[in-house]
Amino acid sequence: MLTIKFIQENKDFVIDRLSVKKFDGKERIEKIIELDNERKNTQFQLDQKLAQLNTISKEIGSLFQAGKTVEANNARQKTSDLKDEIKVFEQNLAEIEKKITSILVQIPNIPHTSVPIGRGAEDNPIIRSGGIIPQAGSKKFPHWELTDKYKIIDFELGNKLTGAGFPVYKGKGAKLQRALINFFLDEAGKEGYMEVQPPILVNEDSGFGTGQLPDKEGQMYHVGIDNLYLIPTAEVPVTNIYRDVLLNAKDFPVKNTAYTPCFRREAGSYGKDVRGLNRLHQFDKVEIVRLEHPSNSYDALEQMVNYVESLVKKLELPYRIVLLCGGDMGFTSAKTYDFEVYSAGQDKWLEVSSVSNFESYQSNRLKLRFKEDSEKKTQFAHTLNGSALALPRIVAALLENNQTEKGIEIPEILRKYTGFDIID
């Protein structure tokens, strides 16, 4: 959430940068400034009334001691009237602040100045790529045919148990899932990320803190009787660990990793792009989350990108890294890199990770602050997160790119985790 102070001091800049996200914020920004000026005026009048009340209250005792009963009773009546007036001012102030917040939460984060202008995914520049795309020639089957052939993922059984988008992993398919999770967690540990195991249900405050609420409730599974939400990503509970926390600058960087199942309704998704593992309602993912000093957050973002790149390299997958343009960015992000791996059986690129810097957008909602040793004033920390990695499309690419006449070969790096070299 943007701060009112920043909006007041950078009105034109904010409106201009929001337009890069294809968001017309002029009317909302001007309304916020109008309401904030009204808030300041109301607060000023309230402070005056409170000061007046304080002064008169102190006089009442002296008047009674001096025997000035009439004056004392008049003063007492005046304090009663002032309290009624103060109550009205406080109610007005609360209503104004509520209106401001209701508008603020509708405004996305502004994109960093390095974010390119563009309308959608077709305008995202490719930053770099690597790996070897399998040569054309022998037919490459899509992963949903391979999983059926080798009996490693059962989509129909998942549909029977729950519904579409909830596959059942079996045999070597289940072991491959576990192998990838352990591999990603071990690699994150080597990189200095502390592993945590958070809940997979969160409350409304947690959803608000990271920006899922009130924006993406339609994409989240809601447990109505308890008013809890199944997490769409470990980013939500892990980042909320630091809600209402005051850090010291020397605590940075704070680095966490977590494996969780993730749940997304994916409302409106249909067609060939949701077939097989391409788009699921429940899937496994290892997430990395960082809290950073504002002066270092963009260096940290590049470090995270390099780390995720090391994972896809070790898995020997052809990949490319794209920088999201303004029109393709998420609501809360200031800058995002997406990782895509090549799918030989589908002849397409599949997104497997997003790595983002949210700057202070989430920390303002979270009230996540820090202070320098020599200063009393607090600042908002910067938050970052990335998929490292999401499993479904990684599995799809591994199956499709490594298929041979003998079976599906397992990348060397994973063999100590799977306990087998080939799926046959």
Image: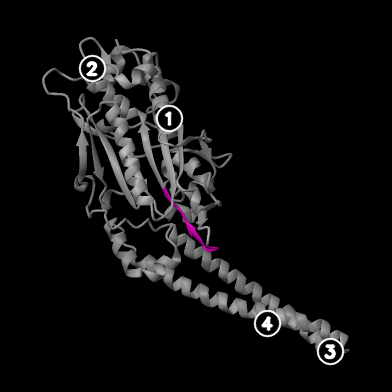
> Which mark is first along the chain, 4 or 3?
4
- Label 4 neighbourhood size at 10 Å, few (<14), some (14-19), many (20+)? some
Label 3, label 2: how far apart the Cα atoms are: 98 Å
Which is in the foreground here, disc 3 or disc 1? 1
* Left or right placement of residue 96 versus residue 65 in this view: left
Along the viewing direction, whichever of 302 and 405 lies nearer the viewer: 302
Callout 2, which amino acid?
A: Gln
Where residue 62 sits, quadrant-wise, is bottom right
The residue type indicated by label 4 comes to Gln
Numbered disc in front, either 4 or 1: 1
Determine crowd level at label 1: few under 14, some 14-19, many 20+ residues with C-alpha closer than 10 A.
Answer: many
Image coordinates of residue 162 in percent, x first then y, are 44, 25
What span is colored magenta in the figure? 375-383
Which residue type does callout 1 highlight? Answer: Leu
Q: How many marks?
A: 4
Measured in 3D between alpha carbons, the distance from the residue under mark 4 to the one under mark 2, in whole angstroms, is: 81 Å
What residue is disc 1 on? 185
Residue labelled with disc 3: 70
Mark 2 or mark 1, earlier in chain: 1
Q: Which residue, given by chain and number where applicable, does mark 2 sit on?
A: 403
Residue 379 within the magenta-colored segment of the rendering: yes
Task: Measuring from the top left, give residue 422's x and y in whole percent.
Answer: 30, 13
| Closer to the camera in the image, 129 or 220 | 129
Image coordinates of residue 192 in percent, x first then y, are 43, 37
Image disc number at residue 52: 4
